[in-house]
Image (cartoon, helix red, strand yellow):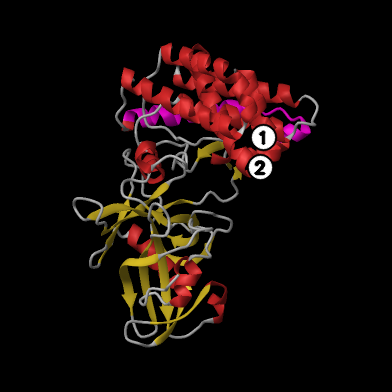
């Protein structure tokens, strides 16, 4: 792999070693598509590079914020990328932007002040989100006190901010999207709409950064998409997956929590149905669902041949679902499970990560879908808790009670009894279990019995 002269060998080599770089195992071919300069002086230059990897079947565009410094501060040693040459020919030190306060403060200010950075042929602008009920602005930052990068992420980089305002200190989190796509990011669009409508089931939203960059594959020659997303950081929150695991292991009743989560999901679906267009499913829509279900079934049988014996039963389940009465299609979470729900101090649940199923394209994640897909995701997640605690006495009853409580909470809040949709819910849960079977067969074979057992039960 050759380095682009404007990036330098050190920066190019660093990019391909990052967790968010998806081209591992192949031969990367990096091309600097564009650069956006945020600020520059003799001591420090902040630049976002748009780097295209053309090494795979489809090019992947990465957002790479870098701070170039004339000196090498000891405090930034852990985020040092290497030394390179700037456009003037001077030797400078490159640092990963999200770890450097020179970048993080500019990023937050861009959102809060609804600023704009113009470049050629790229630009970025901040977009604030406000509640429509006229509630006071919750984020009046006067200055950034500190920032740090959240560890453990795979595809994005999240910056946790400690900020001061006229009320006191608070924490915000800003997700920097590393892989860029043309079009709206569902995580930004859906959470922003929910917060603006007054939903208490998502973290308070601050705003986002929208960027434009060149794209020769589009008629306009330009693409537009989200670069970053800022919202409330829920300090002290615990994810529902770990809480459920602990409760199942100890035999602690979890039905009250499951019921509350069902109610929160129903509230989210209700708000999304009012904020975005819905549609009555047509015959063509149902044919698309049936085709995708069949495609998943074929993939699962290819990975787990023992499922071939269940083909006819699975296909009969799908046929019953297609012939059933369907609810209106609408925007949904798309990848819902216990790990996407946080228990927040104050006895409430917050739903996060609305990006949708990772294997689906950004375009397909943004079209109206069946709310039962989210419900099925939660059914599967409770089943996984049982699988992870299979040696615990009574864990199957524990799981069954949680599933039932979740359906009760959802039905009560939505006013629609989900048990009337049993044929549809079985089909969506089967589809999710087949997806899990493919994943486990490829990545975690010891977990494969969990979805296989569910497929046998549902079929």
Tell me what residue is drawn at x 35 percent, y 43 percent: 189
In the foreground, 180 or 113:
180
Q: Which residue is mark 1?
A: 448
Q: Mark 2–mark 1 contact, CB under 8 Å?
A: yes
Residue 306 is left or right of residue 42, and the answer is right
Distance (Cα) linking label 2 and label 1: 7 Å
Residue 444's label in the rendered image is: 2
Q: Where residue 219 sits: x, y (%)?
A: 19, 50
Q: Is residue 255 magenta?
A: yes
Mark 1 is surrounded, within 10 Å at the Cα level, by few (under 14), some (14 to 19) or many (20 or more) other residues, namely some
Q: Is residue 338 visible?
A: yes
Q: Which residues are magenta?
A: 247-274
**Residue at position x 36%, y 82% from top?**
86
Which quadrant, please, contains the C terminus?
top right
237, above or below 449, in the image: below
Crowding near the residue tagged with mark 2, few <14, some 14–19, many ≥20 C-alpha atoms within 10 Å: few
């Amino acid at each position: 792999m050759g380095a682009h002269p404007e990036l330098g060998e050190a920066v190019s080599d660093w990019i391909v070693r990052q967790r968010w770089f998806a081209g591992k195992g192949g031969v990367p071919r990096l091309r600097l598509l564009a650069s956006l300069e945020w600020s520059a002086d003799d001591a420090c230059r902040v630049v976002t590079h748009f780097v295209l990897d053309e090494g795979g079947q489809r090019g992947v565009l990465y957002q790479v914020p870098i701070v170039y410094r004339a000196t090498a501060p000891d405090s930034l040693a852990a985020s040092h990328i290497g030394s390179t040459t700037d456009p003037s020919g001077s030797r400078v030190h490159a640092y990963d932007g999200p770890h450097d306060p020179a970048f993080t403060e500019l990023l937050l200010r861009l959102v809060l002040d609804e600023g704009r950075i113009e470049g050629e042929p790229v630009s970025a602008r901040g977009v604030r989100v406000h509640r429509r009920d006229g509630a006071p602005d919750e984020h009046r930052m006067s200055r950034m006190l500190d920032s740090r990068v959240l560890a453990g992420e795979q595809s994005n980089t999240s910056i946790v901010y400690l900020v001061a305002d006229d009320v006191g200190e608070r924490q915000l989190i800003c997700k920097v999207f590393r892989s860029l796509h043309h079009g709206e990011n569902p995580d930004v669009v859906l959470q922003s709409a929910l917060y603006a409508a007054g939903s208490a089931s998502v973290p308070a939203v601050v705003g986002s950064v929208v960027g434009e960059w060149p794209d020769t594959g589009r008629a306009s020659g330009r693409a537009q998409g989200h670069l970053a997303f800022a919202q409330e950081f829920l300090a002290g929150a615990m994810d529902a997956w770990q809480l459920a695991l602990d409760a199942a292991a100890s035999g602690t009743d979890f039905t009250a929590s499951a019921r509350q989560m069902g109610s929160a999901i129903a509230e989210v679906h209700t708000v999304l149905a009012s904020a975005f267009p819905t549609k009555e499913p047509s015959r063509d829509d149902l044919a698309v669902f049936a085709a995708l279900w069949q495609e998943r079934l074929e993939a699962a049988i290819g990975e787990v041949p023992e499922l071939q014996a269940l083909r006819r039963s699975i296909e009969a389940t799908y046929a019953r679902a297609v012939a059933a009465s369907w609810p209106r299609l609408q925007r949904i979470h798309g990848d819902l499970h216990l790990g996407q729900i946080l228990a927040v101090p104050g006895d409430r649940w917050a739903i996060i990560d609305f990006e949708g199923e990772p294997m689906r394209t950004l375009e397909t994640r943004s079209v109206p879908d069946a709310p039962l897909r989210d419900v099925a995701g939660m059914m599967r997640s409770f089943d996984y808790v049982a699988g992870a605690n299979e040696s615990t006495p009574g864990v199957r009853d524990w799981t069954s009670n949680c599933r039932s409580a979740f359906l009760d909470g959802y039905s009560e809040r939505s006013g629609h009894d989900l048990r009337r949709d049993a044929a549809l819910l079985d089909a969506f849960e089967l589809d999710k279990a087949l997806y899990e079977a493919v994943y486990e067969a490829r990545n975690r074979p010891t977990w494969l019995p969990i979805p296989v057992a569910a497929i046998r039960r549902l079929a």
